[in-house]
Amino acid sequence: TTDVVVFESLYREDVEIAVHADIEDEGQSVKVYVPEIKTTASIDGKKEITTAGKVTVEDVVSYTNLIPGTEYTIRGTLMNKATGEVFTVNGETITAEVKFTPKGRNGEVKVKFVFDASGITKSTSLVVFESLYRDDVEITTHKDIEDKDQTVTITPPPDIPKTGDTTNLLLPVILLFAAAGTMAGILIRRKKLNTEKKNND
């Protein structure tokens, strides 16, 4: 926030004939507010989750120095922290937008990103980038790939075979053969005992 004071001079034929330059004159002063935003992202109130389904990343955007009664727009994008590139699902960028009209200079607004996380095959950290617009003009941003407040991590559940993945079928096949072998052994032994019993009779 900055107080700007206007100093004026009056000239006639390039000669200064009057001046008004008073740093304390409130009539000459205007206050300039610089808008700022800060974001805190989470999934169901957590920074890290394990899932393979629908995900909602909720970002709480705190703002300061906005003009009450003026419409603003928050536009956000999810970024892949590991690559520094835009995060995509099936080739689609995950974005969100919220329009709001603040009642006061300072406050907060929630932005939600919804997508299907079933395509995530390894632990992935996502970072929320946000920009604040007024009349479609970007007036401030918060884009820091290292900001932990803006970061959430999604890990796929363990031991879930993906499409075309047969690596997790080995254990069930081994158990099936072991069970079949055990059952065959029991039947052979039972048959042998029945045969011995008949011979003894």
Image (tube, rainbow, N blue to C red):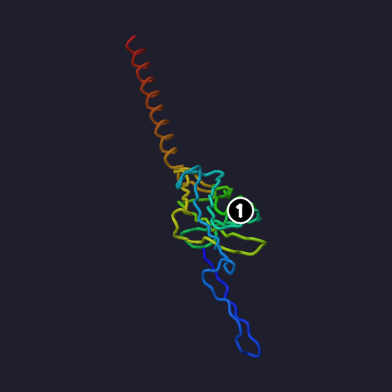
Secondary structure of the residue carrying tag 1 is: strand
Outermost residue to the top: 201
- All told, the count of numbered labels is 1
Q: Residue at x 36, y 20 (%)?
A: 192
Amino acid type, label 1:
Ala
Image quadrant in which you'd find residue 201: top left
Which residue corresponds to mark 1?
Answer: 96
Residue 180 or 48: which is nearer the viewer? 48
Q: Which residue is nearer to you in this view: 165 or 31?
A: 31
Residue 72 in the image: x percent, y percent? Answer: 63, 56
- Residue at the limit of the structure toward the right, as seen here: 135
The answer to whether residue 65 is visible is yes
Q: Is residue 63 left or right of residue 98?
A: left
Query: What residue is at 55 percent from the left and 71 percent from the top?
Result: 5
The picture places residue 118, in percent across and down from the top left corner, at 54, 47
Q: How far across and how far down the image is residue 89, in percent?
A: 58, 54
- Within 10 Å of disc 1 (Cα), the crowding (few <14, some 14-19, many 20+) is some
In this rendering, is residue 139 above or below 101?
below
